[in-house]
Amino acid sequence: MVCIYCGNKTQVTNSRHQKRLNRGWRRRECLTCHAIFTTIEEADYTSSLIVRSSAAKHGPISHFSRDKLFVSILKAVGHRETALEDASALTATITAKLLLGAPDATISPNTIVQTALETLRRFDVVAAIQYEAYHK
C-alpha cells in the first residue's frame, strides 16, 4: 500500500482482525514522510456473490449489492433511534449468513429476503413486519 499523503511505501505497525465484521484493521506508517493512517480491508461482495433470479442453472444473474440490502434494512429499522447503526450491523450479520449458505457463491433473491426476515424477527418484530410488507 502507498501513503495517502505522499504516495511512497508504507509499513504495517499494528493489525487486528475483526472476526464479527469479517474484515481487517491496519495501522500504517509511511517510510518517507512518517505519516500514520488507518486502513480497513474487507471482501468485495459485489464481485464475490452472484444473485440468480430463477431456479434454472442458466437463469439471469446479477451481482450482490450490499448497498441495496443496507437501504432496505434501513427503511425497516427507520423507526428506531439508532437506525443507522442498527442497519449497518444487521446488514453485516445478514451478509455473513448469506456467505455461509452459499458455498458456490450463488444466492437467490428469495434467500436474501428470507435471511433478512429471520434476522430482523430476532432483532425487532416491527422492523421485520415492515421489511416483509415491502418485499412480499
Image (spheres, helix red, strand yellow):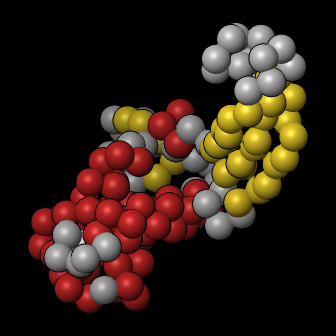
Q: Relative to the observer, which residue lies in front, 11 or 34?
A: 34
Q: Quadrant of residue 43?
A: top right
Q: Is residue 41 left or right of residue 116?
A: right
Residue 12: give x, y in percent of width and height: 85, 36
Q: Is residue 34 visible?
A: yes
Q: Quadrant location of the C terminus?
A: bottom left
Instruction: Report the residue that reaches farthest toward the top.
Output: 7
Q: Name the image quarter holding the N terminus.
A: top right
x, y (%) of residue 97?
A: 54, 67
Report the residue at 58% width, 47% height from top.
Answer: 105
- Residue in front for this viewpoint, 119 or 107: 119
Q: Residue at x 62, y 48 (%)?
A: 104
Q: Residue at x 64, y 20 (%)?
A: 4
Q: Is residue 15 left or right of residue 74?
A: right
| Number of marks in the rendered image | 0
Q: Quadrant of residue 31?
A: top right
Residue 116 position in % (x across, y down): 37, 70
Please report the residue visible at 26 percent of the width from the left and 54 percent of the height from the top.
Answer: 71
Location of residue 130 in the rendering, given as x and y in whole percent from the top left corner: 16, 75
Examine the image and state in which quarter residue 56 appears.
Answer: top left
Residue 134 against residue 31 in the figure, above or below: below
Identify whether 8 is placed above or below 23. Answer: above
Q: Along the line of sight, which residue is nearer the eye, 48 or 11?
A: 11
Residue 73 visible in rendering: no
Front residue of 109/64: it is 64
Pick out the residue farthest to the left: 133
The answer to whether residue 11 is above or below residue 75 is above
